[in-house]
Image (spheres, helix red, strand yellow):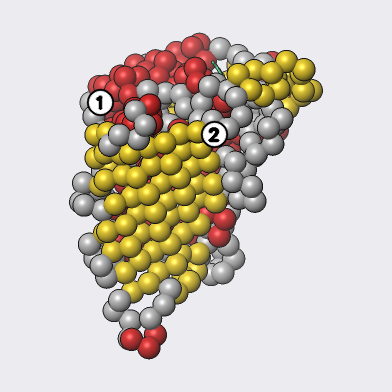
Amino acid sequence: MTTSPLRVAVIGAGFMARAHSHAWRTAPRFFDLSRDPRLSVLVSREEARGQKAAHDWGWDSWSDDWRAVIERDDIDVVDICTPGDTHAEIAIAALGAGKHVLCEKPLANDPADAADMVAAADAAARQGIVAMCGYSYRRTPALASARRLIAEGALGTIRHVRAQYLQDWLSDADAPHTWRLDRASAGSGALGDIGAHSIDTAQWLTGERIEGVSAHLRTFVTSRPRRSAEVGLGGTGDLDAERLPVDVDDAAAFIAGFSGGALGVFEATRMALGHRNANRIEINGDRGSIAFDFERMNELEYYSEDDADDRRGFRTIQATDPAHPYAEAWWPTGHGLGYEHTFTHQVVDFVRSIDGTPEPPTFADAYQVQRVLAAVEESARDEGRYTRVR
Ligand SMILES: NC(=O)c1ccc[n+]([C@@H]2O[C@H](COP(=O)([O-])OP(=O)(O)OC[C@H]3O[C@@H](n4cnc5c(N)ncnc54)[C@H](O)[C@@H]3O)[C@@H](O)[C@H]2O)c1
């Protein structure tokens, strides 16, 4: 296959920039791609961080000016790995400059910005420009297989969606403040940080939209110590005596009505001690069920009513067999995949979209998630009143 270069700029130098760097490097080595990703420039606000990250993660150069990078003729892709308050400005500018855009989730911090991003993506699409949002859990082979099972009708009519996203890194009341606890930067707390993944996964797996919600949000710890540097989940650097306010939710719980009639129960928290990254979903239909937990990401639980009476029960499917999406490119069956593979698969799907085979989630899909997040917040402000997604 002939490969022309695809020159990438990543904006950000934190957790996701590192995961995406690995993915850009790895994707062409394991998958046949029509374009050859080049790690051209990494953008960081801080010089020392930018230089070190660019060097360690394999980028040709670094810059502290994303606006200048977006204007460059020798950049094809802008990969946005910064907090939510920056997504709209960077994405709209990049799309306007004719760059393909991969933007981390949640798409924005509110539906108005997300709608502007959809308009920019629609305009750019007319010039052949691709925009995708980074709901990376879609690229987990076990979940992609679950989606296929559901689309084939193996679960029948969907009745229940039960989604929990449980982390515990904020359980300690003296864990440091980060941008993830600041509404202006993050939009919301556990809800938009991890609950957004559950919403996206649930809608994508079922093919149904959430139409309304009844929600409660809680903030258990209202201030936290400042940390001198803000990179990574907990930040780095010395703890400061000063405490900064927390103005987002620590936990979110809501019930949801789906367009096909299913009933959803959702929970997102960063205070469930003992659960490091339990991104779980269970779906029950009238013919079968699936259950998944990212902490066992190579396994899919599947129950079928079609099994003989004396053989019924959840079975554990190893999603490493080449028959599962993405798995064929990797290791022999049973030699599992990890977190980083989901980002590699995301790059593969993004490059294939540029090549003319569109792969969701589009900005419009991510805008729908944003509207659900807004409805959850509106409902919680009104003591859980059932609130339609607008
Ligand atoms: N897909 C996933 O599973 C997943 C996981 C984690 C984070 N995310 C998303 O990725 C994005 C980044 O999160 P992260 O965990 O990498 O955060 P992080 O704190 O580790 O890194 C953020 C980076 O953005 C930079 N930055 C912040 N504001 C900036 C600005 N105004 N201009 C330029 N750079 C700026 C910071 O200096 C830092 O380098 C967020 O939208 C987050 O929700 C997605």
Q: Does 366 appear above or below 123?
A: below
Residue count near mark 2 (Cα–Cα under 10 Å), binned few <14, some 14–19, many ≥20: many
Q: Does 101 appear above or below 318?
A: above
Identify the residue position indicated by label 1 in the image.
Answer: 122
Q: Residue at x 50, y 33 (%)?
A: 218
**In the displayed image of the protein, which residue is found farthest to the bottom?**
310
Left or right of 216 in this view: 278:
right
- Residue 362 visible to an observer of this rendering: no
Going by the numbered disc 2, the residue's amino acid type is: Asp
Q: Does 352 appear above or below 305?
A: above
Going by the numbered disc 1, the residue's amino acid type is: Asp
Between disc 1 and disc 2, whose residue precedes?
1
- Circle 1 SS class: helix
Identify the residue position indicated by label 2 in the image.
Answer: 250
Q: Quadrant of ligand 1?
A: top right
**In the displayed image of the protein, which residue is found farthest to the left?**
260
Q: Quadrant of the C terminus?
A: top left
Q: Residue at x 38, y 42 (%)?
A: 254
Viewer-proximal residue, 211 or 185? 211
- Circle 2 SS class: loop
**Residue 170, image x, y percentages:** 63, 36
Q: Residue at x 69, y 36 (%)?
A: 172
Viewer-proximal residue, 325 or 305? 305
Q: Is mark 1 within 8 Å of ligand 1?
A: no
